[in-house]
Amino acid sequence: MAAAPPATYAVVLSAILFGIGALGFVFKRNIITIFMSIELMLNAVNLSFVAFSRLLHVLDGQVFVFFVIVVAAAEASVGMAIILQVARNRHSLNIERIDLMKL
Amino acid sequence: MSPDLILFFLLAAVALAGAINLIVQTHPIHSALSLIVVMVALAGIYLLLGAELLAAVQIIVYAGAIMVLFVFIIMLLNAGKEERTSLSHAASWLGVPLAVVLTVVIGWRMGHSAPSPAMGGNVSGVSRTLSEMLFTSYVFPFELTSILILVAILGAVALAKRDF
């Protein structure tokens, strides 16, 4: 069997990707870009699941990635519907303009 | 330095470049395309780590459905203003050599070493066990996710309706 890359490298990559996603979540102003940073963080977590599933020689990590992908899909659809309504009501996608519940 | 390791570092570099580009770009459509690049690179890394079913699911569901939804919404809401940047030229200067390098390394890896479980050397290996686990040990969360998707569909329709 070919020497697979050690899974610890993948865990390090997952941590870096999660950090970049967190940076984007905190510093970006467009609501859709913030949502995409959340998806990036979810992808980083998926990668760490797969890496640990490889390290511990069990498959439970990969099963959990399935569920994370399904939950991300459901969350993305409902989140997009909410963003659509917010954009219709406030006419802006800048979170600094939609930070109060009062119009 | 096995081809697997080189391929991993190449895909990791592509994923990191996509992630940094996501938070650096101002127009959300560029960020969405960078996220698609990250997801495809991660699917390649899943293949290297022996999760071939997950790599396929990642491409089909995550990059093929969820990101398409994102791009729909960005275009529907006309998010961000149209601007011609010089970065499109940089993408072609960087992208074409990178694609060539990636193809060469993948070809080298596939022709070089013996088939591993991740590359179909043992076909009924991981995916079969994964599917069995999904339908025996994890059947309860599996059915719950179907209810979750139903609730999400109802929620999305109810939230995005124009008039009540």
Image: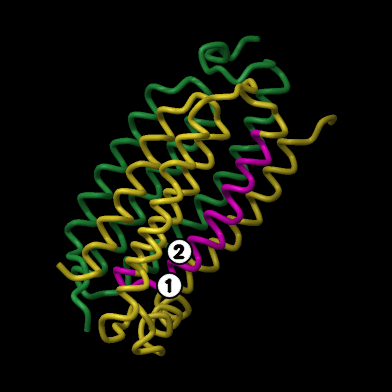
The residue where tag 2 is placed is A66
Circle 1 SS class:
loop
How far apart, in angstroms, are the residues tagged by discs 1 and 2? Answer: 11 Å
Are there few (<14), some (14-19), or many (20+) residues within 10 Å of tag 1?
A: some
Asked whether the residues under marks 1 and 2 belong to the same chain, the reply is no
- Numbered label attached to residue B138: 1
The amino acid on which the numbered mark 1 sits, given as a three-letter code, is: Tyr
Dividing the picture into quadrants, the one containing residue A4 is bottom left
Q: Position of residue A102 (x, y in %)?
A: 62, 10
Are there few (<14), some (14-19), or many (20+) residues within 10 Å of tag 2?
A: some
Point out the image quarter for the N terminus of chain B.
bottom left
Chain identifier of the yellow chain: B
Residue lying at 50% horizontally and 66% vertically, measured from the top left? B57
The reply to whether discs 1 and 2 touch (Cβ–Cβ < 8 Å) is no
Q: Position of residue B96 (x, y in %)?
A: 45, 50
Residue lying at 28% horizontally and 49% vertically, measured from the top left? A14
- Numbered label attached to residue B78: none
- Left or right of A31 in this view: B132: left
Q: Colour of chain A?
A: green
Q: Nearer the viewer, residue B12 or B54?
A: B12
- Left or right of B157 in this view: B93: left
Residue lying at 68% horizontally and 30% vertically, measured from the top left? A84
Residue lying at 41% horizontally and 35% vertically, measured from the top left? B21
Q: Which residues are magenta?
A: B48-74
Tag 1 subunit: B
